[in-house]
Amino acid sequence: MVTLNTQSLTVPVGIIRLLEFVLTLITFSLVASVGHINSSFWAWCMFTWCFCCFVTLLIIILELTSLNTKVPISWDDFTTAFAMLSTLMLLAASVIYPKFFACSTCATQIAATVISCVCFILYAAEVGLTRAKPGEISGFLSTVPGLLKVLEVFVACIIFISLDSRLYSQKAGMQWCVAVYSICFIVSLLIILLTIGRLLARCPFPFDKCLTGFNVLAVLMYITAVVIWPIYSFEGNPRSKFCFSNQIYCIWDSLVVVSCMTCINLIVYIVDTVYSVRLVFFVSPA
Protein backbone atom coordinates (compact mmCIF):
# COMPACT_ATOMS: atom_id res chain seq x y z
CA MET A 1 0.00 0.00 0.00
CA VAL A 2 1.31 3.42 -1.00
CA THR A 3 1.57 6.00 1.77
CA LEU A 4 2.40 9.60 0.91
CA ASN A 5 5.30 10.98 2.90
CA THR A 6 5.18 14.71 2.17
CA GLN A 7 7.75 15.36 4.87
CA SER A 8 10.40 13.90 2.54
CA LEU A 9 9.99 17.02 0.38
CA THR A 10 10.20 19.56 3.20
CA VAL A 11 13.37 18.41 4.96
CA PRO A 12 16.66 20.00 3.76
CA VAL A 13 17.72 16.92 1.76
CA GLY A 14 14.30 16.76 0.08
CA ILE A 15 14.41 20.43 -0.93
CA ILE A 16 17.92 19.99 -2.32
CA ARG A 17 16.80 17.00 -4.37
CA LEU A 18 13.91 18.96 -5.86
CA LEU A 19 16.33 21.70 -6.90
CA GLU A 20 18.72 19.09 -8.31
CA PHE A 21 15.98 17.58 -10.44
CA VAL A 22 14.77 20.91 -11.80
CA LEU A 23 18.23 22.31 -12.55
CA THR A 24 19.65 19.16 -14.17
CA LEU A 25 16.52 19.00 -16.34
CA ILE A 26 17.03 22.65 -17.37
CA THR A 27 20.71 22.02 -18.13
CA PHE A 28 19.91 18.94 -20.21
CA SER A 29 17.22 20.86 -22.12
CA LEU A 30 19.45 23.87 -22.81
CA VAL A 31 22.26 21.75 -24.21
CA ALA A 32 19.83 19.61 -26.24
CA SER A 33 18.32 22.76 -27.75
CA VAL A 34 21.70 23.71 -29.21
CA GLY A 35 21.84 20.50 -31.21
CA HIS A 36 23.68 17.19 -31.28
CA ILE A 37 27.47 17.06 -31.52
CA ASN A 38 29.29 13.90 -32.54
CA SER A 39 31.76 13.77 -29.65
CA SER A 40 32.30 11.37 -26.76
CA PHE A 41 32.80 14.37 -24.48
CA TRP A 42 29.42 15.81 -25.47
CA ALA A 43 27.81 12.39 -24.96
CA TRP A 44 29.40 12.14 -21.49
CA CYS A 45 28.03 15.53 -20.44
CA MET A 46 24.54 14.80 -21.77
CA PHE A 47 24.52 11.39 -20.08
CA THR A 48 25.60 12.99 -16.81
CA TRP A 49 22.75 15.52 -16.74
CA CYS A 50 20.19 12.98 -17.93
CA PHE A 51 21.33 10.30 -15.47
CA CYS A 52 21.37 12.66 -12.49
CA CYS A 53 18.00 14.14 -13.40
CA PHE A 54 16.05 10.93 -13.75
CA VAL A 55 17.64 8.99 -10.88
CA THR A 56 17.00 11.98 -8.61
CA LEU A 57 13.37 12.00 -9.76
CA LEU A 58 13.14 8.27 -9.03
CA ILE A 59 14.50 8.83 -5.50
CA ILE A 60 12.02 11.66 -4.90
CA ILE A 61 9.08 9.53 -6.05
CA LEU A 62 10.09 6.47 -4.04
CA GLU A 63 10.56 8.50 -0.86
CA LEU A 64 7.34 10.48 -1.41
CA THR A 65 5.34 7.25 -1.78
CA SER A 66 7.32 5.45 0.98
CA LEU A 67 8.16 2.71 -1.51
CA ASN A 68 11.84 3.14 -0.67
CA THR A 69 11.19 1.12 2.50
CA LYS A 70 10.09 -1.84 0.39
CA VAL A 71 12.98 -2.06 -2.06
CA PRO A 72 15.41 -4.87 -1.13
CA ILE A 73 18.49 -2.67 -0.95
CA SER A 74 20.24 -0.48 1.58
CA TRP A 75 18.47 2.78 0.76
CA ASP A 76 20.85 5.06 2.68
CA ASP A 77 23.86 3.47 1.02
CA PHE A 78 22.24 3.81 -2.41
CA THR A 79 21.30 7.48 -2.03
CA THR A 80 24.66 8.44 -0.52
CA ALA A 81 26.60 6.61 -3.23
CA PHE A 82 24.43 8.20 -5.93
CA ALA A 83 24.91 11.69 -4.48
CA MET A 84 28.67 11.19 -4.34
CA LEU A 85 28.81 9.82 -7.90
CA SER A 86 26.61 12.63 -9.21
CA THR A 87 28.83 15.22 -7.54
CA LEU A 88 31.89 13.84 -9.31
CA MET A 89 30.14 13.43 -12.66
CA LEU A 90 28.77 16.98 -12.58
CA LEU A 91 32.18 18.35 -11.64
CA ALA A 92 33.66 16.65 -14.70
CA ALA A 93 30.79 17.79 -16.96
CA SER A 94 31.01 21.38 -15.67
CA VAL A 95 34.68 21.45 -16.69
CA ILE A 96 34.50 19.48 -19.95
CA TYR A 97 31.47 21.19 -21.51
CA PRO A 98 32.69 24.81 -21.39
CA LYS A 99 36.20 23.69 -22.37
CA PHE A 100 35.07 22.21 -25.69
CA PHE A 101 31.60 23.58 -26.48
CA ALA A 102 31.23 27.09 -25.00
CA CYS A 103 32.47 30.45 -26.21
CA SER A 104 32.29 34.08 -25.09
CA THR A 105 29.21 34.72 -27.28
CA CYS A 106 27.43 31.38 -26.66
CA ALA A 107 24.72 32.48 -24.22
CA THR A 108 22.94 29.11 -24.09
CA GLN A 109 26.13 27.16 -23.45
CA ILE A 110 27.25 29.62 -20.78
CA ALA A 111 23.87 29.38 -19.04
CA ALA A 112 24.04 25.58 -19.15
CA THR A 113 27.55 25.65 -17.65
CA VAL A 114 26.53 27.97 -14.81
CA ILE A 115 23.49 25.85 -13.94
CA SER A 116 25.60 22.69 -14.11
CA CYS A 117 28.02 24.22 -11.59
CA VAL A 118 25.09 25.02 -9.30
CA CYS A 119 23.96 21.38 -9.62
CA PHE A 120 27.43 20.25 -8.61
CA ILE A 121 27.22 22.41 -5.47
CA LEU A 122 23.77 21.00 -4.63
CA TYR A 123 24.89 17.38 -4.92
CA ALA A 124 28.02 18.15 -2.87
CA ALA A 125 25.73 19.64 -0.22
CA GLU A 126 23.62 16.47 -0.28
CA VAL A 127 26.74 14.37 0.30
CA GLY A 128 27.57 16.57 3.28
CA LEU A 129 24.07 16.14 4.71
CA THR A 130 23.86 12.38 4.21
CA ARG A 131 27.42 11.43 5.09
CA ALA A 132 27.71 9.60 8.38
CA LYS A 133 28.94 11.72 11.26
CA PRO A 134 31.42 10.34 13.84
CA GLY A 135 29.63 8.05 16.25
CA GLU A 136 26.61 7.46 14.02
CA ILE A 137 25.51 3.97 13.04
CA SER A 138 25.19 3.92 9.27
CA GLY A 139 25.81 1.96 6.12
CA PHE A 140 29.31 1.44 4.77
CA LEU A 141 28.87 3.80 1.80
CA SER A 142 27.91 6.65 4.13
CA THR A 143 31.35 6.49 5.78
CA VAL A 144 34.59 7.98 4.47
CA PRO A 145 35.94 4.58 3.23
CA GLY A 146 32.64 3.99 1.41
CA LEU A 147 32.75 7.39 -0.28
CA LEU A 148 36.37 6.72 -1.24
CA LYS A 149 35.22 3.52 -2.98
CA VAL A 150 32.77 5.59 -5.06
CA LEU A 151 35.59 8.01 -5.91
CA GLU A 152 37.86 5.14 -6.97
CA VAL A 153 35.21 3.82 -9.35
CA PHE A 154 34.56 7.26 -10.80
CA VAL A 155 38.24 8.00 -11.46
CA ALA A 156 38.55 4.60 -13.16
CA CYS A 157 35.60 5.55 -15.39
CA ILE A 158 37.42 8.74 -16.44
CA ILE A 159 40.44 6.60 -17.27
CA PHE A 160 38.34 4.24 -19.38
CA ILE A 161 36.65 6.98 -21.42
CA SER A 162 40.12 8.44 -22.11
CA LEU A 163 41.58 5.14 -23.30
CA ASP A 164 41.94 4.30 -26.96
CA SER A 165 42.88 0.80 -28.12
CA ARG A 166 45.45 2.41 -30.41
CA LEU A 167 47.27 3.62 -27.32
CA TYR A 168 48.02 0.28 -25.72
CA SER A 169 47.25 -2.56 -28.16
CA GLN A 170 50.91 -2.97 -29.18
CA LYS A 171 52.59 -2.41 -25.81
CA ALA A 172 52.58 -5.06 -23.10
CA GLY A 173 53.42 -2.56 -20.37
CA MET A 174 50.40 -0.40 -21.17
CA GLN A 175 48.21 -3.51 -21.39
CA TRP A 176 49.29 -4.33 -17.82
CA CYS A 177 48.18 -0.85 -16.74
CA VAL A 178 44.78 -1.35 -18.37
CA ALA A 179 44.52 -4.67 -16.52
CA VAL A 180 45.29 -2.85 -13.24
CA TYR A 181 42.56 -0.28 -13.92
CA SER A 182 40.07 -2.99 -14.84
CA ILE A 183 40.75 -5.33 -11.91
CA CYS A 184 40.60 -2.57 -9.29
CA PHE A 185 37.49 -1.07 -10.90
CA ILE A 186 35.64 -4.39 -10.95
CA VAL A 187 36.45 -5.23 -7.32
CA SER A 188 35.57 -1.73 -6.06
CA LEU A 189 32.31 -1.75 -8.02
CA LEU A 190 31.51 -5.22 -6.68
CA ILE A 191 32.02 -3.97 -3.10
CA ILE A 192 29.61 -1.08 -3.76
CA LEU A 193 26.97 -3.37 -5.29
CA LEU A 194 27.25 -5.92 -2.48
CA THR A 195 26.86 -3.11 0.04
CA ILE A 196 23.79 -1.64 -1.63
CA GLY A 197 22.30 -5.11 -2.05
CA ARG A 198 22.88 -5.94 1.64
CA LEU A 199 24.85 -9.02 0.67
CA LEU A 200 28.03 -8.42 2.66
CA ALA A 201 26.67 -10.36 5.64
CA ARG A 202 26.47 -13.46 3.43
CA CYS A 203 30.13 -13.33 2.49
CA PRO A 204 31.96 -16.38 3.95
CA PHE A 205 34.95 -14.28 5.01
CA PRO A 206 35.59 -11.21 7.22
CA PHE A 207 34.78 -8.23 5.03
CA ASP A 208 36.95 -5.67 6.83
CA LYS A 209 40.14 -7.73 6.61
CA CYS A 210 39.53 -8.68 2.97
CA LEU A 211 38.87 -5.03 2.16
CA THR A 212 42.16 -4.04 3.76
CA GLY A 213 44.00 -6.74 1.81
CA PHE A 214 42.44 -5.60 -1.46
CA ASN A 215 43.33 -1.96 -0.77
CA VAL A 216 46.96 -2.86 -0.10
CA LEU A 217 47.09 -4.90 -3.31
CA ALA A 218 45.42 -2.08 -5.28
CA VAL A 219 48.01 0.40 -3.99
CA LEU A 220 50.86 -1.86 -5.11
CA MET A 221 49.28 -2.40 -8.53
CA TYR A 222 48.63 1.32 -9.04
CA ILE A 223 52.23 2.13 -8.08
CA THR A 224 53.38 0.00 -11.01
CA ALA A 225 50.86 1.73 -13.30
CA VAL A 226 51.99 5.20 -12.18
CA VAL A 227 55.53 4.29 -13.26
CA ILE A 228 54.87 2.18 -16.35
CA TRP A 229 52.13 4.20 -18.09
CA PRO A 230 54.12 7.46 -18.50
CA ILE A 231 57.26 5.58 -19.59
CA TYR A 232 55.47 3.80 -22.43
CA SER A 233 53.28 6.81 -23.25
CA PHE A 234 55.74 9.70 -23.52
CA GLU A 235 59.15 8.16 -24.22
CA GLY A 236 59.94 9.27 -27.76
CA ASN A 237 56.42 10.64 -28.16
CA PRO A 238 56.40 14.47 -28.06
CA ARG A 239 53.13 16.37 -28.30
CA SER A 240 52.03 16.73 -31.91
CA LYS A 241 51.71 20.22 -33.36
CA PHE A 242 48.12 19.35 -34.32
CA CYS A 243 47.24 19.16 -30.61
CA PHE A 244 47.83 22.90 -30.31
CA SER A 245 44.94 23.59 -32.67
CA ASN A 246 41.33 23.80 -31.54
CA GLN A 247 40.68 20.12 -32.09
CA ILE A 248 38.27 18.39 -29.72
CA TYR A 249 40.25 15.18 -29.51
CA CYS A 250 43.99 14.66 -29.22
CA ILE A 251 45.42 11.23 -28.41
CA TRP A 252 48.47 12.72 -26.67
CA ASP A 253 46.22 14.70 -24.34
CA SER A 254 44.35 11.48 -23.53
CA LEU A 255 47.65 9.96 -22.42
CA VAL A 256 48.13 12.88 -20.05
CA VAL A 257 44.60 12.48 -18.66
CA VAL A 258 45.18 8.77 -17.99
CA SER A 259 48.51 9.53 -16.30
CA CYS A 260 46.95 12.18 -14.04
CA MET A 261 43.94 10.03 -13.17
CA THR A 262 46.26 7.11 -12.36
CA CYS A 263 48.14 9.28 -9.86
CA ILE A 264 44.87 10.53 -8.36
CA ASN A 265 43.51 7.01 -7.94
CA LEU A 266 46.76 5.88 -6.33
CA ILE A 267 46.39 8.66 -3.75
CA VAL A 268 42.75 7.69 -3.14
CA TYR A 269 43.65 4.03 -2.66
CA ILE A 270 46.44 5.00 -0.26
CA VAL A 271 44.01 7.08 1.83
CA ASP A 272 41.48 4.24 1.67
CA THR A 273 44.15 1.78 2.85
CA VAL A 274 45.11 4.02 5.77
CA TYR A 275 41.47 4.21 6.86
CA SER A 276 41.02 0.45 6.50
CA VAL A 277 44.19 -0.41 8.45
CA ARG A 278 43.22 2.04 11.18
CA LEU A 279 39.70 0.60 11.50
CA VAL A 280 40.84 -3.04 11.48
CA PHE A 281 43.98 -2.92 13.60
CA PHE A 282 43.81 0.23 15.74
CA VAL A 283 40.13 0.83 16.51
CA SER A 284 38.77 -1.70 18.94
CA PRO A 285 35.08 -2.60 18.65
CA ALA A 286 32.78 -1.04 21.22
Image (cartoon, rainbow, N blue to C red):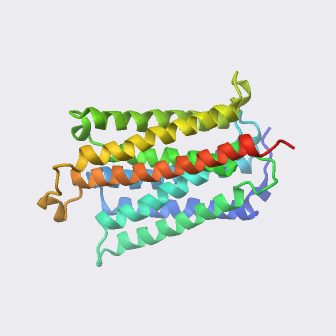
Quarter holding the C terminus is top right
For this view, does 231 lie left or right of residue 225?
Answer: left
Q: Report how many numbered discs are placed on residues in the image.
A: 0
For this view, does 135 lie left or right of residue 224?
Answer: right
For the point 56% across and 47% down, the residue is 150
Residue 65 spot, x, y in % from top left: 74, 47
For the point 59% across and 65% down, the residue is 122
Tell me: residue 121, above or below residue 263.
below
For the point 31% across and 34% down, the residue is 175
For this view, does 16 lie left or right of residue 36?
Answer: right
Tell me: residue 107, above or below residue 56.
below
Quarter holding residue 134:
bottom right
Residue 10 spot, x, y in % from top left: 75, 63
For the point 31% across and 74% down, the residue is 106
Camera-nearest residue between 124 and 208: 208
Tell me: residue 147, above or below residue 117.
above
Residue 183 spot, x, y in % from top left: 46, 32
